[in-house]
């Protein structure tokens, strides 16, 4: 067990050490300063792509034009992906003869991958052809690129004291893919490939198992798919078992690589913000709040999963290895508990253990990580979500101490506060409304759950939380491939992805248009530890007030039922 804990600590520290130079690299990747070596390397390829696409790269966009471009291109990706998934049975690259998806399942799957969630109501090796998997792999790149590009729009809004151009969305999006996602994904894919993860477009292989039976083993372009699944904080598994599957995650080394791959860019984006706008102290404040919140969730999960179940302990069963139900022996309880929080905090949603088998309060922490949805978060969008809480904290703190509500020299006024409050309330509204409807109508909700009691309620709550947070993991006791779950979560996926992007970009655009106000004795400093505490308090209060009653009905009640 001590060895497992050292492994967990190693993954965390390596991620933090890699995040700082990567953050500096990300800031440089989007910088237009003269002598930028990255521009000399990537500009020829990027300019060719933009020219062939008909994009006027030199055109600066307003925040409204950014949103129009973002939403339009996502709509085109959604339509194309849905058509491929529905008709994949009649299209090439289908050696295993997997059939096309039903319209409602294709609707849910296409939306899920377009919005960087990858909520999978199908089993990968039997539900999607290789062409379908390749299309989904493409969506994992571009959806992550959209999130990073949206964050850079926020960066540009605060780069200079005066109103600054917000850049061109298509240029920012392309740089996100070519300069960040592709190089890191290529490196991760190579490591996975040399560790035994398949990379082929051939069909199933025939092998003889230990019992002497001939069985068909699914394979495919797995290494490339799994790499961007984590680097892009997507999380969708090539196989139904996700990173529990030995061909997605065969060794402890691949487990560490996949863990660091999904963790490092969200952390690096925080440092990139400080480097880009030249306010490193502010980025350290944000990093401190996020890391403290993350550790408050991760440490208890590692401890609880390592200790095992009190219900089993009362029967005399040896739990030296921890709570091993639903976990892989090659990974262990501690590393599985750590992964369960990393993947829910940063909205990846990939799994190396079955979250449905987690201890009740571990499941509660996984839910809380998605309900808060602001500690690191997905690529780019995590910082956008945190920005909403900064605006709320600035306004509340200013009112409490009688100082002008300002952020980085721009006054926070009624319009910005209205948008921030709407976005902050949207998240609990989507989760709680969806769960209430599922619980109120047993034929569509409760009867699809695996458990009629507290855990069954948690399964439904988890499904809508995962959809609203663009996470994609699930309490897989829920039978979610139904018309109700496919359509309802599809709608939540759309609203939960794009409105939290629209809101922060709108606020940033409005603030960028305002006159810079020099700091004075009446200005509230936003890069101090005391303000960081205020931001954390706002996050905790919003989460507690909104979600505590629902958590009481689910994981908390289940915890007391097994004591």
Image (spheres, rainbow, N blue to C red):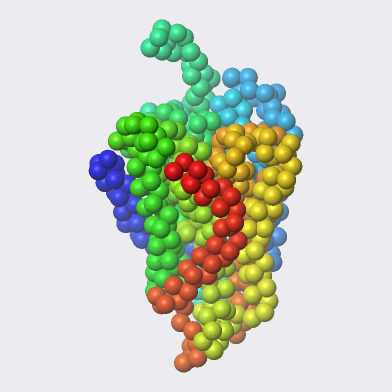
Q: Is residue 431 above or below residue 207?
A: below
- Residue farthest to the top, as pictured: 212
Instruction: Depth check: give the residue in front, 314 or 337.
Output: 314
Image quadrant in which the C terminus is located? top left
Q: In the image, is 380 to the left or to the right of 170?
A: left
Q: Quadrant of residue 352?
A: top left
Q: In the image, residue 293 lies at what x, y percent?
A: 43, 61
Q: Give the total of numbered labels.
A: 0
Instruction: Depth check: give the residue in front, 84 or 542.
Output: 542
The structure residue drawn at horizontal position 59% and vertical position 20%, both measured from the top left corner, is: 95
Q: In the image, residue 529 lies at what x, y percent?
A: 39, 75
Q: Is residue 314 visible?
A: yes
The structure residue drawn at horizontal position 48% and vertical position 13%, both measured from the top left corner, is: 215
Q: In the image, residue 418 lies at what x, y percent?
A: 68, 73
Image quadrant in which the N terminus is located? top left
Q: Is residue 528 above or below residue 208?
A: below
Q: In the image, residue 113 lies at what x, y percent?
A: 61, 43
Q: In the image, is 47 to the left or to the right of 330?
A: right
- Residue farthest to the bottom, as pictured: 521
Instruction: Depth check: give the residue in front, 122 or 203.
Output: 122
The structure residue drawn at horizontal position 48% and vertical position 74%, both measured from the top left corner, is: 534
Q: Is residue 192 visible?
A: no
Instruction: Depth check: give the residue in front, 312 or 147.
Output: 312
Q: Is residue 299 above or below residue 532?
A: above
The structure residue drawn at horizontal position 59% and vertical position 83%, both measured from the top left corner, is: 411
């Amino acid at each position: 067990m001590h060895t497992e804990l050292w492994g967990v600590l190693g993954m965390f520290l390596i991620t933090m050490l890699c995040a700082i130079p990567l953050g500096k690299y990300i800031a440089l990747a989007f910088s237009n300063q003269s002598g930028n070596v990255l521009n000399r390397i990537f500009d020829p390829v990027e300019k060719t792509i933009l020219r062939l696409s008909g994009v006027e790269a030199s055109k600066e966009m307003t925040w409204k034009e950014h949103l129009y471009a973002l939403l339009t291109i996502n709509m085109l990706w959604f339509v194309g992906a849905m058509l491929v998934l529905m008709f994949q049975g009649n299209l090439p690259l289908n050696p295993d003869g997997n059939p096309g998806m039903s319209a409602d399942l294709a609707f849910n799957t296409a939306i899920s991958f377009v919005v960087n969630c990858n909520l999978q109501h199908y089993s990968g090796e039997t539900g999607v052809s290789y062409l379908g998997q390749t299309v989904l792999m493409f969506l994992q790149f571009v959806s992550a690129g959209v999130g990073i590009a949206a964050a850079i729009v926020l960066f540009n809004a605060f780069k200079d004291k005066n109103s600054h151009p917000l850049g061109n969305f298509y240029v920012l999006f392309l740089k996100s893919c070519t300069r960040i996602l592709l190089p890191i994904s290529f490196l991760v894919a190579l490591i996975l490939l040399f560790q035994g993860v398949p990379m082929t477009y051939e069909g199933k292989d025939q092998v003889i198992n230990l019992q002497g039976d001939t069985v068909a083993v699914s394979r495919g372009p797995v290494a490339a798919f799994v790499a961007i699944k984590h680097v892009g904080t997507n999380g969708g598994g090539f196989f139904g078992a996700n990173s529990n599957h030995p061909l997605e995650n065969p060794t402890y080394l691949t487990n560490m690589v996949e863990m660091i791959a999904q963790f490092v860019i969200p952390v690096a984006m925080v440092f990139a913000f400080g480097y880009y706008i030249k306010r490193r102290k502010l980025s350290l404040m944000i990093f401190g709040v996020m890391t403290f919140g993350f550790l408050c969730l991760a440490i208890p999960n590692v401890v609880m999963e390592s200790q095992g179940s009190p219900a089993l302990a009362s029967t005399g069963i040896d739990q030296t290895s921890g709570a091993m139900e639903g976990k892989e022996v090659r990974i262990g309880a501690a590393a599985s508990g750590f992964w369960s929080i990393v993947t829910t905090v940063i909205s990846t949603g990939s799994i190396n253990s079955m979250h449905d088998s987690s201890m009740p309060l571990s499941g509660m922490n996984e839910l809380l990580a998605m309900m808060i949805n602001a500690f690191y978060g997905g690529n780019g969008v995590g910082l956008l979500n945190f920005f909403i809480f900064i605006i709320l904290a600035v306004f509340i703190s200013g009112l409490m101490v009688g100082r002008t509500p300002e952020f980085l020299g721009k006054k926070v006024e009624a319009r910005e506060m209205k948008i921030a409050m709407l976005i902050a309330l949207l998240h609990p509204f989507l989760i709680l409304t969806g769960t209430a409807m599922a619980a109120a109508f047993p034929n569509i909700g409760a009867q699809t759950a695996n458990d009629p009691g507290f855990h069954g309620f948690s399964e439904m709550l988890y499904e809508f939380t995962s959809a609203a947070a663009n996470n994609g993991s699930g309490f897989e006791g829920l039978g979610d491939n139904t018309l109700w779950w496919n359509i309802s979560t599809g709608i939540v996926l759309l609203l939960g992805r794009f409105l939290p992007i629209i809101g922060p970009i709108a606020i940033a655009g409005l603030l960028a248009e305002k006159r810079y106000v020099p700091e004075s004795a009446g200005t509230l400093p936003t890069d101090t530890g005391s303000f960081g505490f205020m931001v954390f308090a706002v996050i905790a209060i919003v989460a507690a007030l909104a979600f505590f009653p629902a958590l009481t009905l689910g994981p908390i009640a289940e915890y007391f039922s097994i004591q």
